[in-house]
Amino acid sequence: MRDSDALEQAATGERRSTENTVRGLKVWTTAARFVRDPIPVLRSLHEEHGSIVAFPNDGFRQSDPRLYVMAFGPQYNEQILTNIEVFRSRGFVPQGPLGSSHQIVRFGLISMNGEQHRLQRGLMMPAFHRRAVDGYRDAIAELTDQMVGSWKIGETRDISRDMRTLALDIASTVLFGYERHESNHHLGEMIEKWMCTCFSPGVWFFQWDLPGAPYRRLLRVAEQLEQEIRQMIDRRRREAADGDDVLSVLIRARDENNRAMTEEELIGEVSVLFTAAHETNTVALTWTLFLLSQHPKILADLVDELEGELRGEPPRVDQFDRLPLLERVIKESLRILPPVAWGTRAVDQPTQLGPYFLPKGSRVLYSQYVTHHLPEIYPSPRKFNPDRWLTLTPPPYAYIPFGGGPRLCIGYSFSMTLLRITLAIVLQRFQLSLAPEARIDRKYQVTIAPKYGMPMIVRPKGEVFRRVVPRGAIHDTVDLTDSSNSS
């Protein structure tokens, strides 16, 4: 297609959709609000404009035909997630200068496309096949047992921090065979610092490597992170390259042309896998335990199911199918508070999306959060109701906590195994009630996380449950009215 044709079609698309196009100062104010907290922005744009809204690039650069589009709902999700030749994955963080440490540590499978993505995913898949994931069961159970074994009745714990520590230990041990506790936490802290810096407004709006600038701090943190990961890979090669952890498998992996991963590819995969494995699982565990603390009837029914089938033991893989309420609880938690709220794609070929013609280079955002809260698919979407899954069969691409299409999250099976085992162990050992006067707000970096932690009191199992209603902005995300009688 000629450039003139593309411009004409782009202009036509804009004329057809003027009412759904955001222009002028509102482009900048919306962008600033989005960086601070994307959830209310996504929600308000959907309420105001419906299933698709566009931001012409002339808000940033005059006479540029490219569009920035936010598209909501299963129909657009399917088009964006399945047409991978048109909609190219971009990752979640700024790209960084060519050849920089930041570019290396951000460039894992999630940022790859085309033949490179196909080959890299093929190299990684053996470590995430069902049989391999089933083999991680004992390590997950042992680490969870160690965590709850340190808890004491009556103490108040930040469950968000505990779940982060646990997810970090599991990721370190299972994914990378890296059992040095202090080193685990040092690497985890470095990745958390890197991610916080990535999502600071100064980095998003001022990407210049100047003294004192947040962008320069980001590049320096990435250099330290790259060095730490290089040392980790070197240790694995020396100590146990024949191990069955994910990193050892990746080091040994060869494609059909006997090609191994490059050093830079290994570094990127370690960084992205480590980040995804402990960030997403941390918040999924934390929010699920919070939601159960607000719904005593659901919690009691779930504990009865777990004890009846498991009798205090961690679940075996063959028992997962005999724990249907546990499955529904996890599924509903990932619906109402999906760890990742949105994703983006770059347009590689001119295409039509709804009423808009998108020239090459346009950007498209889709949202797990908005999709999971569409009332026409999920009645009373802010209600935590695991039993909705007894009868509900949502349309394709209406439930996408792990993405969808050819790029479905490679760690899907691993995460679900971790969530099932960890929740089953914790809930059979203790009751967790929210601390009095707890304030539960959200923050967003890569994931939707509790802003001030999750203070919960450890109580003996079987004690009369005390529901404590939180203060804070969580009420605009989850409807907690009459939750004590929920079933």
Image (tube, rainbow, N blue to C red):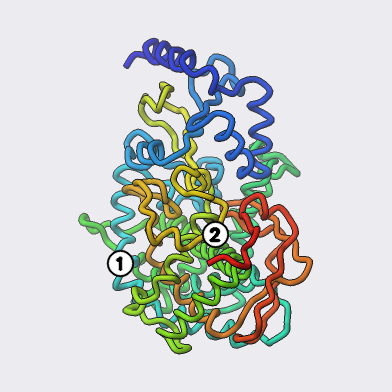
Q: Which residue is mark 2?
A: 384
Q: Residue furthest left?
A: 256
Q: Residue 416, located in which quarter of the rendered image?
A: bottom left
User: Which residue occupies the foreground of this view, 433 or 385?
Assistant: 385
Circle nearer the N terminus (1, 2): 1
Across the whole image, how many numbered discs are drawn on residues?
2
Tag 1: amino acid = His
Q: Quarter of the image containing the N terminus?
A: top left
The residue where tag 1 is placed is 129
Residue 231: numbered disc: none
Mark 2 secondary-structure assignment: loop
Q: Position of residue 245 (x, y in %)?
A: 39, 73
| Circle 2: residue type | Phe
Q: Is residue 49 visible?
A: yes
Q: Is residue 413 left or right of residue 24?
A: left
Callout 2: 10 Å neighbours few (<14), some, many (20+)?
many
List x then y, in percent, for residue 467.
68, 71
Left or right? Give the position of 216 relative to 99: right
Q: Nearer the viewer, residue 30 or 440?
A: 440
The vertical placement of 60 against 97, above or below, is: above
* Label 1, residues with CA under 10 Å away: few <14, some 14-19, many ≥20: some
| Image: 353 above or below 406 | above
In the figure, residue 429 lies in which quadrant?
Answer: bottom right
Which residue appears at 29% of the width and 52% of the height? 119
